Amino acid sequence: MDLSAKYNASEVEDKWYAYWLENKFFHSEPDGREPYTIVIPPPNVTGILHMGHVLNNTLNDVLIRKARMDGKNACWVPGTDHASIATESKVVAKLKGMGISKEDITREEFLKYAWEWKEEHGGIILKQLRKLGASCDWDRTRFTMEPALSEAVINTFVYFYKKGWIYRGVRMVNWDPEGHTAVSDDEVIHKDTQSHFYHMRYFISDGHGNPTDKYIVIATTRPETIMADSAICVNPNDERHFWMKGKKVLIPLINKEIPIIEDDYVEMDFGTGCLKVTPAHDAHDYEIGMRHNLPIIDIIDDHGRLNEQAQILVGEERFEARKKIVKMLEEAGNIEKIEDYTSPVGYSERTNAVIEPRLSAQWFLKMGELAPRALASVEDGIIKFIPDKYRNTYRHWMENARDWCISRQLWWGQRIPAYYLPDGQIVVENSFEKAFKAAQALCPDIKPEDLKQDEDVLDTWFSSWLWPISVFDPDMPGNPGHKPNADLAYYYPTNDLVTAPDIIFFWVARMIMAGNEFMDDVPFHNVYFTGIVRDKIGRKMSKTLGNSPDPLELISKYGADAVRLGMLLCSSAGNDILYDEAMIEQGRNFCAKIWNSFRLVKGWNVDPDVATPAASVVAAKWFENKLSQTIEVVEDHYSKFRISDALMTIYKLFWDDYCSWYLEIVKPAFGAAVDKATYDATLGFFEALVKMIHPIMPFITEELWQNIEERPAGATIMFAPTPKAGAYDEAFIREFETARETVVNVRSIRKQKNISPKEPLALKVKGGFPMETAPVVEKLASITSVELTDDFGDTGAGVPFIIGTVELFLPLTGLVNVEEEIAKVESDLKYQRIFLEGVRRKLSNESFVAHAPEKIVAVERKKEADALSRIESLESQLNSLRNNK
RNA sequence: GGGAGAUUAGCUCAGUCGGUUUAGAGCACCUGCCUUACAAGCAGGGGGUCAAUGGUUCGAAUCCGUUAUCUCCCACCA
């Protein structure tokens, strides 16, 4: 087969991906092998691929391909997440574009549009993942809102409800007035926001609802909420406010009388020391309200507008109302002053709307038993976090976990299976039929139309927390009548999870809870946290900044293998990645290097009559040892999830050891043929290397593997076993290292002295030089002969040098300035003497000799001996040079 | 405010149990080469008081204290 001079990535990638799919190489079924399982962190169903996905899925694919080659039954389950809020807001926006408002259509109509949208855009991201080379078992593709998985979610709700862990409660929630839903604490982002601190006068009432001339000053950032005030609160120890004890004040503008109360919560030195208590619109105020039995006056509606309760400015949007009420207060003489003020304000992660703390009826799942058990799974080491530092974060959160608000005021999602009887009683069942039956038991003459299902849907995480279970067996264990499932039994628990640290609580922690609860076992054993992909100067990637490259464009420009390698190059676990296109160029360059090296080897003429050159024998022996040694290192890196280290180790083995050294040694002269033994060894090494690279760069490696020799139909590198480390001779590897340094030294001397790399030179070496490697030095350094001698004697002009403790001499009569060499040797000598002094100082320190382990002292003694021998040798070289002046 | 982590070469990062002559890598940089696999390359080279400071120790990039700077998480002061 002809190999093009340049590697054509896109052609090769399409060809092999189609081949892999056609042969169902990604598909897994339970069998006798050990399973290795990963479930994909499901991307939003309508999302498109970004660099974060590339990083995450490349890592997943490396792990799964490695496991496959290690002989495990590898199964990577793909799928998508319905992402309630994100998807619903996209659909709402689309409808808006069509002139349709969500309020004007029914739930059923809306869902019809939403499903249409999902069909149209859903799964694009999964198609994109194929371009990246992801070896997902596509036959197992799941969607969190597909009927079976929705059923799992509903059953889970019923399960926990009947267990008594789900309850309905009125709570202060984070209301998103734009998304018209409550969002969890974790979905609120606090940002410092420039606003004003309004100092308002509240006049003391005379007891009959009329203002006196005395007043107190209250500072607030939210004057539009004064109508919802239930009290004014001061610190009981604040002397400034003793005079107003038991008095009442009037709310400005509406003249409503409210009491002055005392509570420790109020800080004396903040603001004016007086707090307006607005239980309906502030979480702390709510708690104060509960303590003091204050009425709750809710004046803001779902859309963030003032309602009738406000009495004034009814229907105004909250920020508009703020502007207007300030004006009204000013006119009424209630404003003392207005200060600029920067304070943290909560924003919705999804819609970026300012969060409105609001009381509302929500469904909650108790964390009381789930959280401690999930904490123990990690603390006891059953689940490992990589890097380990996230354990601290996790512990802190789990120890303070609050009950999980699982209801969302949306339509896109699993509708809560709670049904309300006209009298307010609630039945929870997984179908209307069952619910109606249950309702009849409570109220015998109820009609079907009187039973109303809860309008809310469940939090998306309430479905994704089941993911590692439900993708295998949507009929959740724990359900009455659940039957054992072969897939679940085989694949669960999964092995590793690769995800971003920002969803450690949303998703990771909750999957652990669900796993423990339903499977009595953790969902995975290792969690590898990636960093966030940022741009070159450390900014988060964002659409508005325009600093987020399109992965598909990069793939078409550089090839998927290059993109994969580029992303992995500087991604140690948990560290953010500063993305730079240069990394991907490096990936492309590596592809080219691999490609060209193969072209070289494949281009050789093999002659069975040619004897194996001595240098090639040494090279093959060395590389075989080096390969085994490196495989061991790589395996160790993988076992510790040090993927970028494993990658770099393989990269250097290929580029430096194989290409720059091994191939250069065995390369026949132009036009000459290569011997059979060397050719076979070279190709064998190449095959091992390509297999090592495959998990990282699947496409080019398949292409080359298929070209190494004729492969049977249906063969693939994907199932070729990972090369195993054999025994290796470390001493020989070190000896070869000496030869390598010798070559570098000779080349360096040539360069310094301006001697052509091809000018033949002789080399003298003393005892300790590994003569076995001499042919290598001769070939790579253009040395005519390596001569072993006890004494360089009167060698004439030349350059002496030392490698470790081996002395070498490169005679350069007539080619070198002896004076310069003398100066150089003198400076070396000086350095060695200072070094020796240092070592001796250490050794003459009795404390050191007494305390340090014998091994360390021995090392110091060897240093001393080596330095002495080097000094001796330098001195003799110096003499020799001086004699030849 | 509470907590966690970090600070090593121009950049991104390794550095395991405190000890192996002068602390490593990749990229970038400098010099010379278009040498029949590869200029997306080859060969050679330069570059770091390991944030500062004090301590423990025979010995500290590594352990402890303090300071500075940065990042993340949690809570948010009306």
Image (cartoon, rainbow, N blue to C red):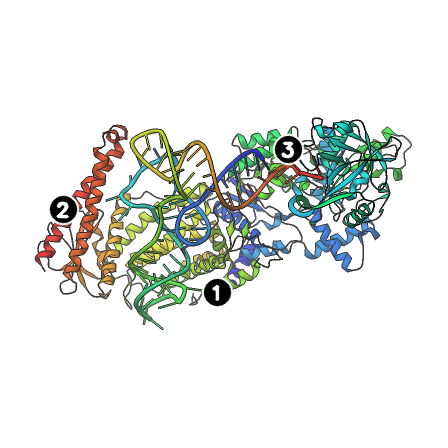
Q: For the residues tagged 1 and 2, is the chain the same? A: yes
Q: Chain of mark 1?
A: A
State the separation of the CA atoms marked 1 and 3.
Answer: 53 Å
Judged by depth in the image, the label closer to the viewer, 1 or 2, is: 2
Name the residue type under label 1: Asn
Q: Residues within 10 Å of mark 2 (few under 14, many from 20)?
A: few
Q: Earlier in the sequence, mark 2 or mark 3?
A: 3
Name the residue type under label 3: Ala
Residue A757's x, y, as percent? 24, 64
B1 vs A653, nearest the viewer? B1
As drawn, A153 above or below A688: above
Residue beneath label 1, please?
Answer: A8
Q: Chain of mark 3?
A: A
Residue A872 badge: 2
B26 vs A481, nearest the viewer? B26
Residue B22's x, y, as percent? 29, 45
As drawn, A727 above or below A521: below
Residue beneath label 3, please?
Answer: A401
Relative to A475, is A53 on the left or the right? left
Residue A614 appearing in the image: no
Is label 3 in a helix, a strand or a loop?
A: loop
Judged by depth in the image, the label closer to the viewer, 1 or 3, is: 3
Name the residue type under label 2: Glu
Q: Earlier in the sequence, mark 1 or mark 2?
A: 1
| Quarter that holds the C terminus of chain A | bottom left
Q: Residue at x 89, y 32 (%)?
A: A208
Q: For the residues tagged 1 and 3, is the chain the same? A: yes
